[in-house]
Image: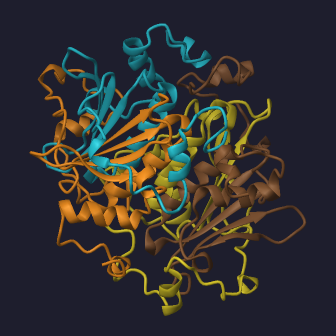
Chain colours: A cyan, B orange, C yellow, D brown
Amino acid sequence: MTEMTDVSCPLPSEQENADQAKGNPTLDSSTFIPPVPLAYPSIIIEFCDRCRWLHRATWVSTELFLTFPPPALKAISIIPLNSEETGGRFRVWLNLEGSPPQLMWDRKIEGGFPELKGLKQRIRDHVQPGKSLGHSDKKSE
Amino acid sequence: MTEMTDVSCPLPSEQENADQAKGNPTLDSSTFIPPVPLAYPSIIIEFCDRCRWLHRATWVSTELFLTFPPPALKAISIIPLNSEETGGRFRVWLNLEGSPPQLMWDRKIEGGFPELKGLKQRIRDHVQPGKSLGHSDKKSE
Amino acid sequence: MTEMTDVSCPLPSEQENADQAKGNPTLDSSTFIPPVPLAYPSIIIEFCDRCRWLHRATWVSTELFLTFPPPALKAISIIPLNSEETGGRFRVWLNLEGSPPQLMWDRKIEGGFPELKGLKQRIRDHVQPGKSLGHSDKKSE
Amino acid sequence: MTEMTDVSCPLPSEQENADQAKGNPTLDSSTFIPPVPLAYPSIIIEFCDRCRWLHRATWVSTELFLTFPPPALKAISIIPLNSEETGGRFRVWLNLEGSPPQLMWDRKIEGGFPELKGLKQRIRDHVQPGKSLGHSDKKSE
């Protein structure tokens, strides 16, 4: 695996120029279309920042994107919280079009952090019901 | 630094119980309030997934949260793209209340990836104008 | 927290120059002292790369350094393995001076991945016996 | 990509049992062979921890393993430093069998952090001279 390969990304010639150190100041950023505020399907990870769970949340995000690359998941948002009421929170939500966010994991309900296999199975059942997650998947079905 | 310290997170007693392996199935998740779809200020990182820039995007996210913990930044969303039109894209957007997303970085315009110091300065100028980013900050002002 | 702060890192003036884009080619790298091959205390994380556990290993590494900054831990080495005999391996070893590496975690023995709290307690007992890992620490003692 | 797939990791039946929650306490860890202290080829990343470069170092490690999976690189060690003399240090070393570590990057000499493409090219020239790093590779040759 390389950072950028011959086959995977047919770049337009403008970009080749942009790769030069000078950049391409003639591109007009006012023509850029901002991303939509909320893509579907997407994941939101809320966590207590006072409990120092940023890196755990980020790791979960990385694993979910590797298992469900776009368009299976189109976005993951990470939301650190630091108020007293949200102390100890670690929640994973799934956003599907046309319904409010669905809770995939709550640390207090489940009594701990998501074991990845289980979290992936729950998300898979919503976004790619037919997808196998490998032989580790079979045991829990 | 520890994962959870005595002083930083005064957990309610319910949570102590939830820490046990059994969890707390009597918590009623239907009472949970889903996160708002778009918090302010927040960051969106769009990138070409075919160029394998997930880990770069995730690293930038980690660094921004460490420099701008909530409420300076309330959320960061990561959006992988894999169509031909978005080949080579790496854009960082800032969402402030009451205005459309503002472009903080575009790889094609700038001719490369954000050097963190510069990206942090641009974001700082919007979300915490008086904040010093350390002595490395002074040289470029 | 910033990437580089006024107080934490009193840089010599040579470095200030080196921060410029041109670099400092007059520094003589032949005078640089290579790092010692094996510092103590240190951690080694071995894992099966075919099981795609790189990001899990890297996350564990990040958490251990945040809880045990140097000199409590002086180095962490990550070793991906991809032979048939090492299929499914996830082991964490502790290197202390004067003794062979001590096993802190083995996925097959323990029946799963390290829950961070438990792994940190085991390592703490060797490298910083008096250190509190926070209130989450007390329950399991 | 899944965390564990049908084809990539033919686990022995002992391991299937170990996957159960109870673990496999009858495995005799005294028979485990500790990893060799220094595998070749391998990378060492030294950095100033007071400059908060842990996440940058970790990200570089992740990228190098994705481009040079084992056996091209067999280990990466991360060494945080926090003394005054090592203020501002960010060095990447390559260990090849039979020679002392070779410097691949020094922040003070180069005047900044490694741009990944360049660092990968330098390492590639030593560990996999014939390997293409993709079309982004060609421009700088």
**Relative image position of residue B35 (x, y in whole percent):** 18, 33
Q: Residue furthest left?
A: B98
Residue C84: quadrant of the picture: top right
**Residue drawn at 60 percent across, 75 percent down:** D110
Residue C141 visible: no
**Relative image position of residue A64 (x, y in whole percent):** 45, 30
Q: Residue furthest bottom?
A: C13
Residue D12: quadrant of the picture: top right
**Relative image position of residue C43 (x, y in whole percent):** 62, 57
**What quarter of the picture does the N terminus of chain C occupy?**
bottom left
Residue D80: quadrant of the picture: bottom right
Is C35 situated left or right of D20 in this image?
Answer: right
Q: Residue furthest front?
A: A26
A56 or C13: nearer the viewer: C13
**Residue drawn at 46 percent across, 29 percent down:** A116
A35 or B9: nearer the viewer: A35
Is A125 situated left or right of C56 in this image?
Answer: left
Residue B41 visible: yes
**Relative image position of residue C135 (x, y in whole percent):** 30, 53
Is B118 situated left or right of C46 in this image?
Answer: left
Residue B56 to residue A131: above or below:
below
A59 or B13: nearer the viewer: A59
**Residue drawn at 79 percent across, 45 percent down:** D71
Residue B31 to residue D59: above or below:
above
Is C16 situated left or right of C45 in this image?
Answer: left
Number of marks in the image? 0
**Residue drawn at 76 percent across, 54 percent down:** D124
